[in-house]
């Protein structure tokens, strides 16, 4: 563990379930650059965990290792107790970890409803011959998947845009659609990479509502975010990364007052202040 | 969707966007535009048939078994019989239709006036023309020659290509103009219906011109089939493939080897066809495997290499199985229910037409299903697709395999039709032609690909091959014999290139672009992957 500050309060605020995701000494090297160094922490089932840190701290790299886009140079990533290191991204998605991206990566020239339907790809059973000849089973499955995708869009207030190409959607709705796509496969753990980036205050409030609702429905959410109002408002626990290392982990109030966190965000001089402002959003 | 009771467990619930927020262009709106493009394509196609039928005898030498009689013949001779009047009526109908289409085009281009204001009138005019042509056909068949006054002695027997072409054109125009609203709403169905109807009648319409039917069977149908297969790889999955002729070769050689005297194997064609398909699909997957990590230019170079290896291997008589430069000869002609196809092009053409229809239907089903969405996802963003649960490996391999299997069909027919397969038929130029067919027709849209397949094969394998003859005959009839003395064979590729450039300038997304591609060009920016398809990634 590289957590420098011992935790004062006893564990997370709400969720005390078993860890759904564990990172144990995870390291990622790009040539000589140590992007993520010996990171250890865990995400409790049913919790909302935020990962914060200055730009270049290795947050997205950590996400990429959890979702299989990068293979860790060392250490282990466990999902429900089972190691997922070395699995390809689609297998990890099927196991129950899906994500959104920092720069929205929707399927641009595909309609919104089809974007969501791609999310159900790994759950569908039809093979290529059944699709080719549109067997009754395949047709039923298509219809069920489309209905579920429409429900998902309805739930996220995107119903009117079902027939619109993803790239024609306004920016805020593209963020929502990406969440809808990630939810479509019915994941246990949802990773959100800066979901509030570029949203206006109204949209941020809506987003926080969405995240809170998802948690109520039993989903575990692990997000990277720079907007401290969002982070402090919804997180059960916060992990702080700087230069690829975990410098703090704990309840929002603990992290907010942690000297090393303030130093990482505001520089050495600011660490001595008694009542620091929350780190500025970027 | 009405089935709201299937509520998704994880769907959250937040307020919808207010109704007064304007919607961006939807896919169905784009589909309507696409249908209107199909309407125009059909109008132009119908007019080409009418005008070409009328003008044919000015360009094509009259022979006893070739082009004999056309309405234009009667007009150019002295107007004596009552039948001649009918021919003038047909001519007038043609002029009115041309004027109407020109007016519509003017309105559309300048955005002034109301196009189609008289669409009913125009449908009626087209109907008059079609009925007139039918009557003329009947008169010629029943040899009521006094009705026409003195006619050319060649105008005996069945009415010929020129008359049938004019009739077909008028029929298409009647249908398209009369049912304009329906055609505009159901563009793809209308296009498919008309193309396959004309296709089915094609060997009859051009019954006098054996070589044109041969063109239809061995060039138009084969290239359309190849383009449909390549469209799976390039259009649906976004993988640029420059070596597609290799799969064509594999299909042709496999089928040729299994049903010729070269190896003493004479399996029935219809079984061999599916073996060829399976072998081509296997090779498609085999080529796909090493290219899985490549995209855009890099993928293109590797496929290019594969496209060079296969014909070379065949040329070098690999394993003594391919017969070297002479290839495989004496391939059996297929037969069905005891009827042997022989060397007549018509049965091949009809069989290919059925296969093309089936292939289009099956590909459409795939495109609208799980796999089709996965292809689109991989094309648009491979990393996001993988993180969403799409297996990029199997999805890409299936694209290569399915694309290749279609060319296996084409190869089987190609060999059976010609009776021989040689390495020359599968050079790089074939891959490029098929790719340009796909791009020109409209990447990712099977309707456009069929239109492109017909157009490109017509230009390359018929128009350019007959340029000399056409202009020579035209020059002779109009006192310009020098037209026939120019050696056009030097010009064919300049003409071909100019036509390609012209079409791409006028319709940058292809003749009938896919919806996604259309949106892309309208929105001004391009996705990485489609830019990669164009080799600019």
Image (cartoon, rainbow, N blue to C red):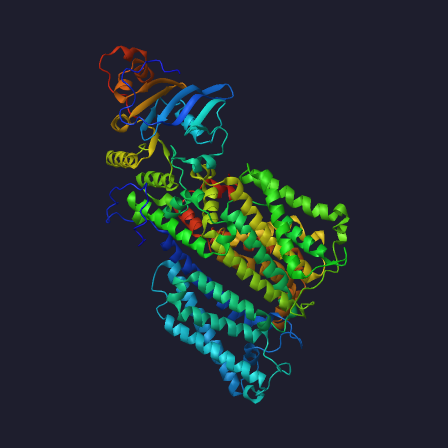
Location of residue B422 in the rendering, given as x and y in whole percent from the top left corner: 72, 54
Say which of B535 and A57 sits in front: A57
Task: Please name the residue shown 62% across and 53% down the image.
Answer: B277
Q: Residue furthest left?
A: A275
Q: Residue at x 62, y 77 (%)?
A: B68
Residue B218 position (above or below residue A229): below
Decide if residue A194 is in sight here. no
Furthest-bottom residue in this view: B146
Query: x%, y% of residue B443?
Result: 50, 51
* Residue B276, quarter of picture: bottom right
User: In the depicted view, which residue is nearer to us: B15 or B509?
Assistant: B15
The foreground one among B364 and A31 is B364
Q: Is residue B339 visible?
A: yes
Placement of A68 over or under B110, stated as above or below:
above
Who is closer to the viewer here, A28 or A93? A93
Horizontal and vertical percent position of residue B458: 58, 61
Quadrant, the C terminus of chain A: top left
Q: How many marks?
A: 0
Q: Is residue A209 above or below residue A72?
A: below
In the shown orientation, is residue B245 left or right of residue A79? right
Depicted B270 relative to depicted B518: above or below = below
Tell me where residue A1 appears, x and y as whole percent: 40, 16
**Residue drawn at (64%, 54%), measured in percent from left and top?**
B275
């Amino acid at each position: 563990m590289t957590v420098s500050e011992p935790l004062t309060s006893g564990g997370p605020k709400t969720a005390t379930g078993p860890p759904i995701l564990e990172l144990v000494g995870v390291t990622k090297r790009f040539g000589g650059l140590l992007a993520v160094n010996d990171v250890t922490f865990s995400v409790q089932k049913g919790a909302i965990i935020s990962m914060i840190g200055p730009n270049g701290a290795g947050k997205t790299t950590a996400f990429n290792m959890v979702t299989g886009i990068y293979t860790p140079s060392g250490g282990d990533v466990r999902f429900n107790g089972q190691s997922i290191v070395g699995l390809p991204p689609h297998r990890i998605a099927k196991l129950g970890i899906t994500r959104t991206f920092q720069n929205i990566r929707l399927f641009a020239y595909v309609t919104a409803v089809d974007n969501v339907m791609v999310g159900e790809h790994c759950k569908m059973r039809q093979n290529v011959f059944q699709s080719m000849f549109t067997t009754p089973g395949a047709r039923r499955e298509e219809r069920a998947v489309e209905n579920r995708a429409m429900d998902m869009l309805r739930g996220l207030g995107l119903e009117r845009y079902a027939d619109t190409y993803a790239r024609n959607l306004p920016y805020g709705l593209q963020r929502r659609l990406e969440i809808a796509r990630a939810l479509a496969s019915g994941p246990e753990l949802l990773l959100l990479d800066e979901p509030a980036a570029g949203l206006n205050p109204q949209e941020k409030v809506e987003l926080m509502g969405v995240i809170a609702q998802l948690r109520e429905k039993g989903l575990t959410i692990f997000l990277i975010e720079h907007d401290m109002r969002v982070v402090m408002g919804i997180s059960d626990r916060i992990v702080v990364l700087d230069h690829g290392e975990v410098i703090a982990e704990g309840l929002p109030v603990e992290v907010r007052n942690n000297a090393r966190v303030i130093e990482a965000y505001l520089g050495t001089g600011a660490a001595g202040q008694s009542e620091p402002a929350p780190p500025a959003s970027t | 969707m009405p089935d709201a009771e299937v509520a998704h467990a994880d769907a959250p619930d937040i307020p919808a966007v207010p109704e007064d927020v304007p919607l961006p262009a939807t896919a169905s709106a784009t589909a309507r535009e696409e249908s209107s493009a199909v309407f125009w394509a059909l109008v132009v196609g119908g007019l080409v048939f009418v005008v070409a039928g009328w003008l044919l005898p000015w360009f094509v030498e009259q022979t006893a078994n070739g082009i004999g009689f056309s309405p234009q013949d009667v007009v150019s001779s002295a107007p004596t019989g009552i039948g001649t009047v009918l021919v003038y009526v047909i001519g007038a109908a043609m002029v009115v239709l041309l004027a109407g289409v020109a007016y519509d085009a003017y309105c559309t281009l300048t955005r002034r006036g109301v196009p189609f204001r008289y669409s009913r009138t125009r449908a009626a005019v087209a109907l008059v023309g079609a009925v007139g042509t039918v009557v003329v056909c009947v008169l010629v068949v029943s040899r009521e020659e006094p009705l026409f006054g003195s006619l050319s002695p060649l105008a005996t027997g069945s009415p010929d290509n020129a008359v049938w072409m004019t009739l077909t054109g008028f029929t298409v125009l009647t249908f398209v103009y009369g049912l304009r609203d329906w055609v505009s709403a159901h563009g793809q169905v209308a296009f498919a219906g008309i193309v396959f109807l004309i296709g089915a009648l094609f060997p009859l319409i051009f019954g006098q011109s054996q070589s044109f039917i041969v063109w239809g069977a061995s060039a138009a149908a084969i290239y359309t089939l190849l383009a449909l297969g390549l469209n799976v790889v390039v259009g649906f999955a976004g993988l640029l493939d420059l070596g597609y002729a290799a799969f064509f070769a594999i299909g042709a050689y496999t089928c040729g080897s299994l049903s010729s005297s070269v190896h003493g194997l004479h399996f029935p064609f219809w079984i061999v066809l599916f073996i060829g398909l399976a072998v081509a699909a296997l090779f498609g997957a085999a080529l796909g495997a090493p290219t899985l990590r490549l995209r855009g230019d890099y993928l293109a170079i590797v496929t290019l290499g594969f496209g060079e290896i296969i014909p070379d291997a065949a040329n070098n008589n690999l394993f003594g199985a391919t017969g070297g430069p002479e290839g495989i000869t004496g391939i059996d002609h297929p037969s069905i229910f005891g009827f042997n196809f022989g060397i007549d092009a018509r049965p091949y053409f009809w069989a290919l037409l059925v296969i093309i229809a089936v292939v289009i239907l099956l590909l459409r089903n795939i495109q609208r299903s799980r796999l089709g969405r996965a292809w689109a996802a991989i094309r648009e963003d491979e990393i996001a697709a993988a993180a969403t649960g799409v297996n990029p490996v199997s999805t890409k391999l299936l694209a290569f395999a399915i694309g290749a299997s279609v060319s296996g069909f084409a190869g089987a027919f190609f060999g059976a039709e010609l009776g021989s397969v040689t390495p020359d038929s599968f050079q790089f130029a074939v891959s490029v032609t098929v790719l340009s067919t796909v791009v020109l027709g409209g990447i990712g849209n099977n309707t456009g690909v069929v239109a492109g397949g017909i157009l490109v094969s017509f230009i390359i394998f018929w128009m350019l091959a007959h340029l000399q003859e056409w202009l020579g005959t035209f020059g002779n009839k109009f006192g310009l014999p020098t037209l026939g003395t120019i050696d056009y064979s030097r010009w064919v590729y300049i003409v071909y290139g100019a036509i390609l450039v012209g079409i791409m300038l006028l319709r940058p997304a292809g003749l009938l672009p896919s919806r996604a591609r259309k949106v892309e060009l309208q929105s001004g920016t391009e996705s990485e992957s489609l830019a990669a398809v164009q080799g600019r990634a």
